[in-house]
Image: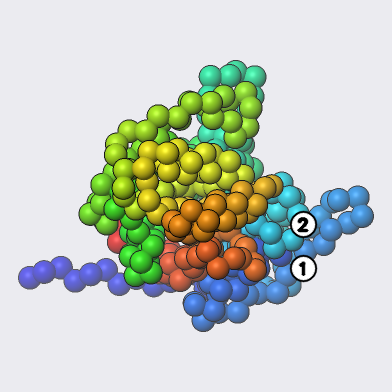
Amino acid sequence: MPEKPLERTPRAPIALMACESGRIFAEEVAGRLGHELIPSTETWFACGEGKTEIKANVRGHDLYVFQTVVGQQDSRSIYDRFIMLLHAVEAAALSDAQYITAVVPYYPGARQDKRKGRTREGISAGLFARMLQSAGADRVMTVEIHNDAIAGMFNPSYTHLENVFLTRHFVSWLKDNSLIGDVVVSPDVGYLERARAYAEELSADLAALSKERDYSKPNQVFRSTLIGDVSDKNILLVDDIIDTAGSVVASIEELKERGGKNIIVACIHPVFSQRAWERLAAVKEKATKEGWDFQVVGTSAVTHEKTPDWYHCYHIEELVAEVVEKINSRGSVAGI
C-alpha cells in the first residue's frame, strides 16, 4: 500500500508586518494571503536615528517582516531601510515571536559578494547576512539573489536563506504578453546559465556579451565581445539587476551594431538609480525615430510609480504569498 502523506499543520499562527518602505509590497502579499498587516510604528528622530515598535501581540507567532530596500517609494537610502529592517526584526525577537522571516525581495549588498581581486575592502553580502542573523532572523526570503553562494554566508544553525526563483514564472508571463525574442542574450557570461534557462523555456537561440570591467570604478565596462549571432533577429536581453542602465544601454548599442532588430530588456530587479530612466527613455526615442521596437520589463521586487507605457511590470506578490504559505504550513517550495 502506498504510504499516506504526512499530515502537516501550521508551525505557528501566521502574522505579517511591514517596515514603511516595504508597505506597498507587503499589503499586496497580505491581500493575497487574506491577512491584515499587524500594526506597527516606525519613528525617525531628528538626529537620523530610528526605531520600530510592534503594536500587537506576536508572542508564539510565525512572523514575516517585509522591507523593500530599493525603489522610489520614499527618500530613504538603502542603508536607512536596511537598518530599519534590523530594528523591526529585533523588536519581533524581543517580543517573543516563535519564528521570524525577513522578506527582502532585493537583497542589499548582493553584488558585493567577493573582493574581485582587491584585498582592502569588505564583503557586504556577508556583513548584511551576519547583521540579520544577529538581529534575530530565523530566515531571510529574497528573490533571485545575485549569487546563490550567499546562502553559505548565513550560519544554518541560526538563519536560512530562502531564495525564490522566478525564471519559469517570469518566462511564462513574458510569453503570455508577447514580450519575447528570437534570441535570448545575456549581458555578461556570469548570467549565461540563467539566460540559458530563458532560452530553453522559449525554444530560442542563445547569445552572450563578454564584458571586461574596471572594478576600481563602479558601473564601468571598457571592452565587450559578442558570443553568438543576433543579426536580423528580435532580441530578449535578460539580466537580474539593472542599476544605472549604463551597461544595458551599451549592450543595446552593440547588439544594434551587430544587426539586431527589435529589443526587449527584461530584468528581475529594476533598481533604476540616477539617470537610468533618462538613459532608457533616450533609447526608446532613438528606436521610435529609427523604426524599431524597444520595451523594458521589470518585476515588482522594486517599486516604481508612474512608469512610461514602454515599461511593463510583472507582479511577484502572488508567488511570494505562495512561498510564505508553504513555509508556514511546513510544505515544500521546490515545486513552486
Label 1, on which residue? 41
- Compared to residue 331, the image places residue 238 above or below, namely above
Residue 33 is situated, as x and y percent measured from the top left of the image, at 49, 77
Q: Position of residue 69 (x, y in %)?
A: 64, 53
Would you say 41 lies left or right of 245 here?
Answer: right
Can residue 200 be spotted in the picture? yes
**Residue 54 position within the rendered picture, expressed as x and y whole percent measured from the top left:** 72, 68
Q: What secondary structure is found at the residue carrying circle 2?
A: loop
The outermost residue toward the left is: 1
Residue placed furthest toward the right: 46
Question: Circle 1 sits in a helix, a strand or a loop, which is it?
Answer: strand
- Name the colour scheme: rainbow
Residue situated in front as seen by the camera: 105 or 132: 105
Which residue carries the number 2 mark? 75
Pick the residue in front: 250 or 189. Answer: 250
Between the residue at mark 1 and the residue at mark 2, the CA separation in whole angstroms equals 18 Å
Contact, mark 1 vs mark 2 (Cβ under 8 Å): no
Q: Amino acid at mark 2?
A: Ser
Q: Inspect the image, locate mark 1, and give the three-letter code of the amino acid beneath it.
A: Thr
| Residue at 30% in and 72% down | 7
On the rendered image, what quadrant is the C terminus found in? Answer: bottom left
Q: Residues within 10 Å of mark 2 (few under 14, many from 20)?
A: few
Residue plotted at (34% across, 53% down): 234
Q: Measuring from the top left, give residue 196's x and y in whole percent.
A: 30, 45
Callout 1 crowding tier (Cα within 10 Å): few <14, some 14–19, many ≥20? few
At x 60%, y 79%, the residue is 36
Image side of residue 98 versus residue 231, left or right: right
Decide if residue 195 is in sight here. Answer: no
Disc with the residue nearer the chain's start (1 vs 2): 1
Nearer to me, 253 or 12: 253
Q: Is residue 195 left or right of residue 323?
A: left
